[in-house]
Amino acid sequence: MLEFARQHKKPVMIAESSPIEGIHATDLDAWNTWFVNLFSLVHEKNIKALSFINANWQAYPGFMELAWKDARLQNNPAIAAAWLEHISRPRYLKQSDNLYESLGYNTGE
């Protein structure tokens, strides 16, 4: 898919991403494996949009049988801080009064 997008000069979005093994309170495994790989892919492949789902998957019917775990950032303050530090970099757009203009849209005001 990434090669196809590159060949056709199309942007790529990673939608609905979440570490299915969860984020645990006492270790950095999720950061050192899942998040590091995610952000490396975003950087190396110039991914244009990223959506992270901050969810406790075990709270939703259907996900219990999949064995997806609690992937909320707030489970681990160190991972939450690392996430916030990483997405605060200039590469990532944030909510702002001029976000649409930053994306090249005219708000009509």
Image (cartoon, rainbow, N blue to C red):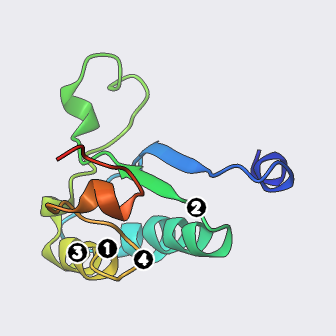
Asked if residue 23 shows in the view, the reply is no
Residue 2: image location, x then y, percent: 75, 52
Spatial CA span between label 4 and label 3: 13 Å
The three-letter code of the residue at mark 2 reads Ile
Residue placed at 35% from the left, 64% from the top? 102
Residue under pointer 1 = 87
Residue 91, label in figure: 4
The three-letter code of the residue at mark 4 reads Arg
Residue closest to the far right: 7
Q: Earlier in the sequence, mark 4 or mark 2?
A: 2
Q: Are marks 2 and 1 in contact (CB under 8 Å)?
A: no
Spatial CA span between label 4 and label 2: 11 Å
- In the figure, is residue 65 to the left or right of 100? right
Residue 27, label in figure: none
Q: Are marks 1 and 3 in contact (CB under 8 Å)?
A: yes
The three-letter code of the residue at mark 3 reads Leu
> Total number of numbered labels?
4
Q: Earlier in the sequence, mark 3 or mark 2?
A: 2
Spatial CA span between label 4 and label 1: 8 Å
Q: Secondary structure at mark 3?
A: helix
Q: Residues within 10 Å of mark 2 (few under 14, many from 20)?
A: some
> 37 or 4: nearer the eye?
4
Residue 84, label in figure: 3
Q: Are marks 4 and 2 in contact (CB under 8 Å)?
A: no
Q: Earlier in the sequence, mark 2 or mark 1?
A: 2
The three-letter code of the residue at mark 1 reads Ile
Q: Secondary structure at mark 4?
A: loop
Q: Are marks 4 and 1 in contact (CB under 8 Å)?
A: no
92 is higher (above) or lower (below) than 5: below
- The N terminus lies in quadrant: top right
Residue under pointer 2 = 47
> 26 or 94: nearer the eye?
94
